[in-house]
């Protein structure tokens, strides 16, 4: 579940320094190195040679990896682009069609159907478009590139293992540009670790079987730390005198403590007062406000894009019956170029904002909140032209 041209920062187990360094250079030599490593791992040499014999660099993959400006879009605009009435209607129809599967998932894993429906919708439009990139070419291309070889190199060997099981065709298996496969877009290693036969036919077919894809996705969420039966996100109303520096994912308090500060559910009631939660302001104090429960953080285990994660979590609440959020009247944000200037200024002051990419991620938000507090501004983590001018 890591597609939609998303920013990949997958938190996979670490690999050796030698593997991290094995990237770039002559492509043929790089492939030869993959073959040698696979054989050293115990794979049959003839199988390895056949598996990698036709692999090619895919420049389309590199273009998609470098072109991710969509994540510079503010939450309100981004969510309105992704969430349509058609997607809501189809999601509810599919919830009924696969009611038995979702009921089983809710019982076995404690994951609400809206959560998986939202991923299914955003990743592949409920399975209608799963990507047309050759998966092996995509994985090898991204492993050869030296930006994140430690993420993608292990996926090549996982794909080889799937191939040995008869579940991966190096010439025909296709998916997303970053190597994900199936209706909820899982990387080969995730398939090995979490692939489930959801329809009882004895096979794990994530491209053609909705039950297989949904149950596998649920198992992966559980393996990433999803807490059984707990909420993930809820829209809230905040008091005008709230200490805005308390907002953001860096601060957690119990629901009961937030309630004592005047935070209330926009509709219904807040969840268990003993749960830890944070207050999320995607576009500052003038825009929508959400309470983020522990399960919200699980979303970041496969995607570091703040705007994507928040939109996916919010859409899941809509599919569970929540109303459209109150968009409010947020202050105008910064353009992509302005955001890069802001990130540069913050980095020069010692803040870890990650890449200077014009994307307002969690690191940049935390730095903005700190700088706002230092300058006597409402510390809501939403950068404005005024803050940029002051820096």
Image (spheres, rainbow, N blue to C red):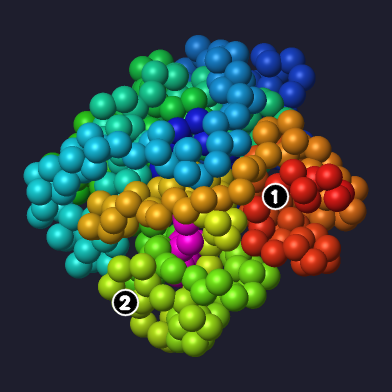
Q: Nearer the viewer, residue 122 or 381?
A: 381
Observer-nearest residue: 211 or 290? 290
Mark 1 secondary-structure assignment? loop
Q: Position of residue 143 (x, y in %)?
A: 63, 30
Residue 31 visible in the shown view: yes
From the image, tell me which residue sits under label 1. 383
Determine whether, in the image, residue 11 is placed left or right of residue 318.
right
Residue at x 82%, y 55% (from the top left corner): 351
Identify the residue shown where x is 70% and y is 64%: 378
- Residue at the spot x=59%, y=75% of the render? 242
Dot 2: within a 10 Å radius of its alpha carbon, few (fewer than 14), some, or many (20 or more) residues? few
Q: Residues within 10 Å of mark 1 (few under 14, many from 20)?
A: many
| The one of 355 and 9 positioned closer to us in this rendering | 355
Q: Exactly how many numbered labels are in the figure? A: 2
- Residue matched to label 2: 269
User: In the picture shown, does residue 94 fall above or below 81?
Assistant: below
User: Does the magenta segment cover residue 297?
Assistant: yes
Q: Is residue 277 left or right of residue 101?
A: right
Image x and y of residue 35, in percent: 60, 26
Q: Do we see residue 14 in this rendering?
A: no
**Residue 154 quadrant:** top right
**Residue positioned 44% across, 69% down in the render:** 237
Please state the horizontal and vertical placement of residue 38, each as a whole percent of the image.
57, 33
- Give the quarter of the figure containing the N terminus: top left
Q: Which residues are magenta?
A: 288-300
Q: Nearer the viewer, residue 161 or 135?
A: 135
Q: Tell me whether the residue at label 1 lies in contact with that at label 2, contact meaning CB atoms closer than 8 angstroms.
A: no
- Mark 1 or mark 2: name the one nearer the start of the chain: 2
How far apart are labels 1 and 2 at the CA level? 31 Å
User: In the image, is residue 74 above or below residue 379?
Assistant: above
């Amino acid at each position: 579940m890591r597609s939609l041209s998303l920013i990949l920062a997958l938190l996979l187990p670490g690999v050796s320094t030698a593997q991290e360094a094995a990237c770039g250079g002559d492509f043929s030599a790089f492939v030869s190195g993959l073959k040698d490593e696979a054989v050293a791992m115990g794979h049959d040499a003839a199988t390895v040679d056949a598996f990698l014999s036709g692999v090619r660099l895919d420049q389309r993959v590199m273009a998609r990896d470098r072109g991710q400006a969509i994540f510079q879009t503010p939450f309100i605009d981004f969510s309105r682009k992704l969430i349509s009435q058609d997607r809501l209607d189809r999601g509810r129809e599919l919830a009924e069609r696969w009611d038995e599967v979702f009921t089983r998932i809710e019982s076995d894993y404690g994951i609400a159907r809206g959560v998986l429906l939202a991923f299914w919708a955003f990743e592949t439009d409920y399975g209608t478009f799963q990507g047309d990139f050759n998966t092996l070419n995509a994985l090898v291309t991204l492993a050869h590139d030296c930006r994140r070889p430690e993420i993608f190199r292990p996926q090549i060997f996982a794909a080889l293992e799937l191939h040995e099981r008869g579940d991966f065709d190096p010439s025909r298996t296709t998916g997303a540009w970053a190597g994900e496969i199936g209706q909820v877009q899982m990387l080969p290693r995730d398939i090995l670790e979490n692939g489930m036969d959801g329809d009882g036919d004895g096979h794990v077919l994530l491209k053609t079987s909705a039950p297989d894809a949904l149950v596998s996705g649920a198992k992966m969420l559980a393996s990433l730390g999803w807490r059984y039966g707990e909420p993930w996100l809820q829209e809230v109303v905040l008091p005008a005198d709230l200490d805005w520096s308390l907002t953001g994912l860096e601060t957690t308090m119990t629901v009961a403590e937030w309630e004592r500060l005047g935070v209330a559910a926009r509709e219904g009631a807040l969840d268990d007062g003993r749960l830890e939660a944070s207050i999320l302001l995607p576009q500052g104090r003038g825009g929508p406000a959400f309470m983020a429960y522990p399960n919200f953080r699980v979303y970041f285990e496969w995607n570091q894009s703040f705007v994507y994660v928040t939109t996916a979590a919010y859409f899941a609440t809509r599919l569970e019956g929540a109303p459209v959020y109150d968009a409010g009247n947020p202050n105008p944000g910064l353009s992509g170029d302005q955001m890069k200037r802001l990130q540069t200024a913050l980095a020069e002051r010692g803040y870890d904002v990650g890449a200077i990419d014009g994307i307002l991620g969690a690191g940049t938000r935390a730095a903005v909140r700190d700088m706002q507090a230092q300058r006597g501004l409402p510390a809501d983590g939403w950068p404005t032209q005024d803050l940029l001018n002051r820096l």
